[in-house]
Amino acid sequence: MNFRDSQPIYLQIAERLMDEILAGKYGPDERIPGVRDYSLLLQVNVNTTTKAFDQLRQRDIIYDRRGMGCYVSPDAKTKILDIRRRNFFQQWIPDLSRTMKQLNISLDQLSLALQNA
């Protein structure tokens, strides 16, 4: 995996695992690879992957079964979509609005461009 310098690696790993859950690679209540296996797969330090898994546990996207590993929460997809929608509206919309004002782009023009995309 190629990591970006703009974001901590553990957050990028958490994002990747959320992408995999959204894509259906891991379903509700399905076991995900262990920290060591996922670290080997991505060629990163186990502590970095542990931090990513902790991040996902805090958001209730994955949970532990004692002695059995980590599993995808039943409502993980809904939670991931909520997180990403919230991020979209907080991060992208203000920049989009500012750019539209600078370039004098109307909502109708934006709507047409989105329909054609």
Image (cartoon, rainbow, N blue to C red):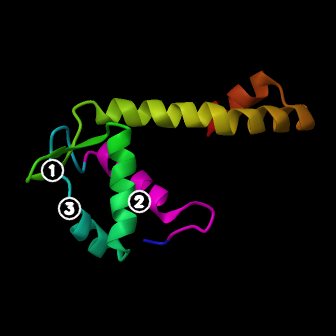
Image position of 24 with respect to 105: above or below:
below
Q: Residue at x 24, y 37 (%)?
A: 73
Q: Does 57 sit left or right of 112 as displayed?
A: left
Q: Does 102 sit left or right of 86 as displayed?
A: right
Q: CA distance from mark 3 to mark 1?
A: 9 Å
Residue 84 screen position, x and y as percent: 50, 37
Going by the numbered disc 2, the residue's amino acid type is Ile
Cβ atoms at labels 3 and 2 below 8 Å apart: no
Going by the numbered disc 1, the residue's amino acid type is Arg
Mark 1 Cα-neighbour bin, 10 Å: few <14, some 14–19, many ≥20: some
Q: For numbered disc 3, what is the local secondary structure? A: loop
Kindly indicate the quadrant of the structure image that contains residue 49. Answer: bottom left
For disc 1, the marked residue is: 31
Kindly indicate the quadrant of the structure image that contains residue 79. Answer: top left
Q: Does 9 sit left or right of 94 as displayed?
A: left
Mark 3 Cα-neighbour bin, 10 Å: few <14, some 14–19, many ≥20: some
For disc 2, the marked residue is: 13
